[in-house]
Image (cartoon, grey):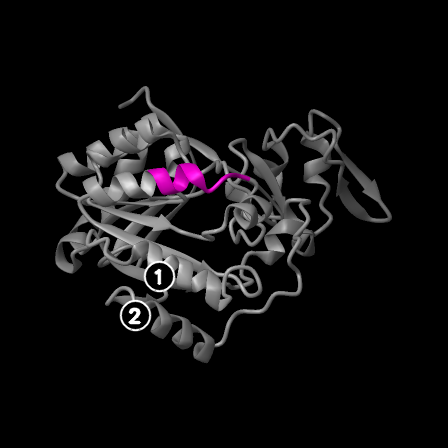
Amino acid sequence: MKDIHGNIFNIMRFAVNDGPGIRTTVFLKGCPLHCAWCHNPESISPAPELMLRPERCIACGACLSVCPQRAIEKIDGRYVTHRRLCRECGACADACPAEVRSLIGKMMTVEEVMREVEKDKIFYQSSGGGVTLSGGEPLMQPQFSSALLTACKNKKIHTAVDTSGYAPLSIVKKTNKYVDLFLFDLKILDEELHIKYTGFSLQPILTNLSWLCRNANELVVRVPLIPGINDAPDQIEKIGRFVAGKKSIKEIQLLPYHRSGADKYARLALEYTLPNLVSPGRQKMQEIASSLQKHIQTVSIGG
């Protein structure tokens, strides 16, 4: 365990939307998909990334003096970072007293993560909660994920994996041994649209979901509802027909699109390609939920 490291970008305690009960959600960095609506853009790249909050800058110049690449320049009283020169070493983040700069992604051992996880073990026991691996895509770090899940099982902690489903089937099979609950994203059941908005084929996802329908301990399908992309009646009907009759799928969770991650794109010097989207209203969500209940009994809104 001491030799197995994972790239972690957040550990959220007292999470209540990532599985049953009170949970600790461990966010692993790196995702094979590039969903246009992603609200965790810092999770996509497997490498560490520099995130900037220039509005906090107090113009102390500490970052300028420590940057080994000379990627920071003072221009008209502002400290500008030239991303093409930056090597994401984190020296400026360590030196910044105003937390303008932060390095997203930290290598941690299973043992280090478990120390954080076990702080709230009493709450898992009292609420029926546990630990959820999320991301990014936790199956992109299969050795670390399996080791962490095994450590949780050894401590009798309930385990969940929140996954896009885009991974080799061999990894899904191996990971399944240590997972009590899969939270499986199903975004679009149209190959052309899936490639357009995520960058990759739908087929490996459906292959893995079909296998998990036969072999997972418990399986919940999550559908992020993105206005104008996957919320049309025909798209919802495709999802409903796909899950119909699959008794192993206990529930569909509808996750309404939100803009909470939009500001992160600018902080990472990335382009947000869906700036005009707005969250679907409650009435729209209820209509979609009612439509899906024709195919599966349990449909909930939110995690």
Range of residues picked out in magenta: 200-207
Amino acid type, residue under disc 1 in the picture: Gly
Q: Give the farthest residue toward the bottom.
A: 283
At a point 34% along the width and 61% down the height, the residue shown is 253
> Which label was assigned to residue 294?
2
* Residue corresponding to mark 1: 240
In the foreground, 93 or 214: 214
Residue 225 percent coordinates (x, y): 47, 62
Pick whichever of labels 2 and 1 is earlier in the sequence. Answer: 1
Residue 295, placed above or below residue 284: above
Residue 267 percent coordinates (x, y): 64, 49
At a point 53% along the width and 69% down the height, the residue shown is 279
Residue 293 percent coordinates (x, y): 30, 70
Q: Quadrant of residue 143?
A: top left
Amino acid type, residue under disc 2 in the picture: Lys
Q: Quadrant of the C terminus?
A: bottom left
In the foreground, 260 or 197: 197
Left or right: where 89 falls relative to 295 = right
Q: Is residue 234 magenta?
A: no
Helix, strand or loop for the magenta stretch, by majority:
helix
Left or right: where 294 falls relative to 227 = left
At a point 60% along the width and 47% down the height, the residue shown is 196
